[in-house]
Image (cartoon, grey):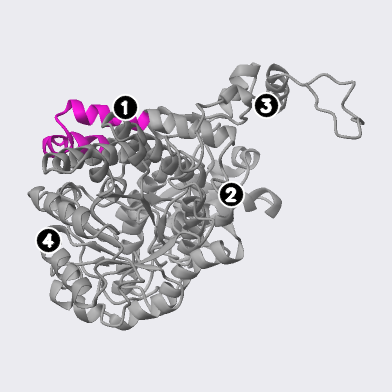
Amino acid sequence: MTVLPDDGLSLATEFADATHEQWQQLVAGVLRKSGKDVSGAEAETLLSTALDDGLRTPPLYTARHRAPDPGLPGFAPFVRGGRPEGSAADGWDVRQRHAVPDAEAVLGDLENGVTSLWLAVGDSGGIPVAALADVLKDVYLDLAPVVLDAGAETEPAARELLRLYEERGAAGAARGGLGADPLGHEARTGEALDPAAAAGLAALCAERHPGLRAVTVDALPYHEAGGSAAQELGCSLATAVAYLRELTAAGLSAAQACAQLEFRYAATADQFLTVAKLRAARRLFARVAEVCGAPGAGAQLQHAVTSPVMATRRDPWVNMLRTTVATLAAGVGGADAVTVLPFDHAIGLPDAFSRRIARNTSAILVEESHLARVIDPAGGSWYVERLTDELAHAGWAFFQEIERAGGHAAALRSGMVGQRLAATWAERGRRLATRREPVTGVSEFPDLAEKPVVREPAPRPPAGGLPRVRRDEAFEALRARSDAHLAATGARPRVFLAALGPAAVHTARLTFAANLFQAGGVEPVTGGDFADSGAAEVCLCSGDAVYEEQGAVAAAELRAAGARHVYLAGRPGPYDGADTYVHAGCDAVAVLTDALDRMGVAR
């Protein structure tokens, strides 16, 4: 019904509320004008967006899409946040990652907005354990939380950090985490660790260091292996349950065991999916804590990290936009701590400028945009609440699969987890290859004249377990081949774009073709004659009517002039002469790989 304003005047008083069916009919009418003859319900389905895990988002959410009551912030099931006050008082914890022993960089971050440190520790890919004292020499350990990520060297690294706390009189005020994550390490490296060490550290923290959490449930290995949001949730939940079993077997109560866990999730540029994932993660763990008999201990402590998978090596400046959206989503989703990976993270060691941009991303969102001032700003949105509910169910279903396989350790060792993640990534790879999922600066709007960003090499990350994937990897391989060809011959592989007809007719497809070929490192040549272009392949660019009239003749003339392969920008139609058709939705990676192979560009 229509609710009247206070003055009693409403211009809509005499009109009945529109129904959902009427809206569907209007949508169907619009679609018919574009040649799609569909009914009302079919029209809504046509406009829906398919997500991973079999989920779909319709184009319009209404009260019909109500989800279960999410409760209140700070109360079970903690969907709306683990604390009643959220991050409203001080904003979220701005956590910067460091992987090399650089005390000056660490101090510079803390002096300029960073509120906690995430240290990658270990002789094989991080800060040596023996260097921790030097790295933290000027850090006030009673003020700045420190979180370790030490893999197989977790126990010695944790003991060294605890020694520093004792030595500096900060043992009672210590905050942060020791980062014990044996299952995460196994997922990364394939090396199984004894969980007893993690249980021992948890018992120590529960007894003597109430501000420290000993165990990290890191979902990044599954995200970085190509997993979906629901798979990330399922793996994290299965890991948490495995750790709760270990900790309670070591003598901790269920509530104490829950209080020893910190959860780490990826935040992507798909902002609503990230918001819903973080909210669903809290709901799922609250259910686990409830079943364990500790419903009040089910509030997750969440650490969100901007996705390494979405970061690109080409045109890395666009990563700033990606991480800004991801950070916004993490904050809106209720993350307690957020790490913004610097825009050059995928290239090598971040420099001072990129670290500054990373920490300022959170600073601007918190201090200038006041994003943290509203507790659970997405709460009540039919879209977000429904997506949260659907993700929670999908994540729980995958968690149950893992449990049926014998638990997370067994599912990892049997290959079940890896196979499921690989299947998800293969499907996503098809969307990336066809540019249904575009990557700005890589598969869309690439710049062959771009000056590469050069950085010092970063420590090699742990390997041997689940793979690490990136959205740009297929196109990056093509561009690397082109770069090597340029270095060896002094020129990139080329394609001649033959524009037929007036500019008003050919410009759109000329632009499309130029964009497509540059994504694979093939330099498009426009203007002049084919014979002077230095290219051996050609792409016809125009409208369908011109193709029918001139396409076959133009293709024959170009072949006579030496063209070995003829592309046509557009879908197949009633015209001859083309060897390959390039169009929206075609497999760009396959087309470009074949082109480079024919042009003699080494793999």
Density class for disc 4 (Cα within 10 Å; few <14, some 14-19, many ≥20) is some
Give the camera-side residue of 362 and 580.
Answer: 362
Q: Nearer the viewer, mark 1 or mark 2?
A: 1
Badge number at residue 397: 1
Disc 3 and disc 2: Cα gap in Å?
Answer: 24 Å
Q: Nearer the viewer, mark 1 or mark 3?
A: 1
Badge number at residue 509: 2
Badge number at residue 155: 4
- Report the amino acid beneath label 2: Arg
- Number of marks present in the image shown: 4
Q: Nearer the viewer, mark 4 or mark 3?
A: 4
Q: Residue at x 47, y 41 (%)?
A: 273
Give the camera-side residue of 429 and 51.
Answer: 51
Q: Earlier in the sequence, mark 2 or mark 4?
A: 4
Q: Is residue 409 magenta-colored?
A: yes
- The image shows residue 538 at horizontal and vertical percentages of 47, 54
- The image shows residue 197 at horizontal and vertical percentages of 10, 53
Q: Residue at x 44, y 29 (%)?
A: 390
Give the magenta part as a residue range. Answer: 394-422
Q: Main secondary structure of the magenta part?
A: helix
Q: Quadrant of residue 29?
A: top right
- Report the amino acid beneath label 1: Ala
